[in-house]
Image (spheres, rainbow, N blue to C red):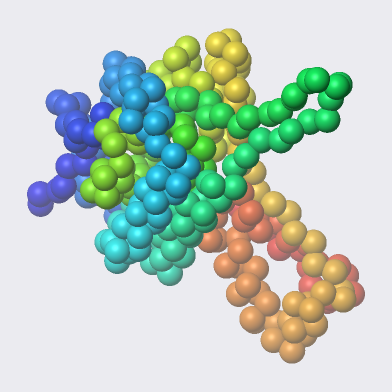
Amino acid sequence: MSVDTYPAIINGQSVVNSRLMDDLDPSTGAPFALVTQCSASDVEAAIDAARVAYEGVWGRLTANERGKALRAIGDAILAHKAELDTLESIDTGKPLKQARTDVDVAARYFHFYSGVVEALSGSTIPSASGVFAFTLREPYGVTGHIIPWNYPLQIGSRTIAPALAAGNCCVLKPAEDAPLTAIRLGQLALDVGIPDGVLNVVPGYGREAGHALATSRRIDHLAFTGSRETGAAVAQAASANVVPVSLELGGKSPNVVFADAPSTRRSRRSPRQFSRTLAKLALQARGCWSSAASMTRCWPDSRSASVAFP
C-alpha cells in the first residue's frame, strides 16, 4: 500500500531528503506516512531562513499587518478542518471527537492573537525632571519550539501564534511520533501568503533535530512542552548559550472529589455517569495529557473509593 510523504518546511520550500521516518498509525502499528527526517544541518538552515525573514520582510510588517496574517492562518485551519480532524485523530490515536476540538482550538489561538497583537505596547515611567523613561516591547528574534505528540496542532498553534504576533520568526520541531498536522500548519501558512522563512517546520528525532535546536547558539528563545526529564535537559542545554526558555513539563493530575461537590451529588443519582466522567478524564488523549485524572480520590462521605488508572 502506498503512503504519503510529508516534507520539512524550510525557507518556504517543501524539503524531502533521502532520510525518511515511518509515521505509524497507533491503532494498527503499521506505517501510514513517511516523514522527512531532518538533520542538524537542516535545523541550521531553518534558523538561517528565520533570521533572514526576521531581519527582512517580517520584521518590517506593522502589528496590523501581522494580525491580518495570523487571521488568515486561523481561517485556513478552519477551511481545512475535516482534513486536519482526521489527520490528527489517526496520527495521535485520539478519538475523532477530541481531534475536532483540537483543530477548533488551534484556529482560535491564531484568531485571538490576530486581535491582541495591536494591544502590545510599552509604558512611560515617571522619573526625574527632564528625564523621559519608557519601556518598549520587542520581539526576541528567532524562536525555537519543541512540541509533544499528544496535541501537535493545538500546542503547536499555542506556541507559534503568540510568537508570530510579537514579530518573531519560528523554527518548529514536532514530535517524531505525530508530526503531520504541524507540517500541514507550515504548509497552510505558506498557502495564505506568510513570507518564506517566517515559519519553518523541522520534523525529526529528538536526539538529532531536537538536540540541534536546543543547543543552537543562534536562536533567541526556546519553548518546550514535554516530559520533566527532557525539559531539564533542554533547559540545561539552552542555559549554556544564555538562551531564555519557557517550559511546560508533563505530569498527571490527582483529583479530589469532596462530598458536597455537585458532581458527587449527581453521582448518587447516577453512579455510572460519574464513573464515565472519571474514565473520560483519565483516558483522554490515550491517558497522556498533563490533566489526566490518573488518580482520583473521593471523600469518604461520597460513598466512593479511590480510583487509580495506570
Q: Is 131 left or right of 26, judged from the image as shown?
A: right
**Which one is in front, 2 or 63?**
63
Instruction: Give the vertical position of 13 relative to 232 (above or below).
Output: below
Residue at 51% x, 37% y is: 166
For this orientation, the residue located farthest to the left is 2
Within the image, what quadrant is residue 96 found in? bottom left
Q: Is 185 left or right of 292, judged from the image as shown?
A: left
Residue 238 at x, y percent in the picture: 55, 17
Residue 170 at x, y percent in the picture: 41, 32
Instruction: Give the vertical position of 24 relative to 198 (above or below).
Output: below
Residue at 43% x, 69% y is: 97
Residue at 66% x, 35% y is: 122
Q: Is 175 left or right of 235, judged from the image as shown?
A: left
For this orientation, the residue located farthest to the bottom is 269
**Which one is in front, 211 or 306?**
211
Residue 134 at x, y percent in the picture: 71, 28
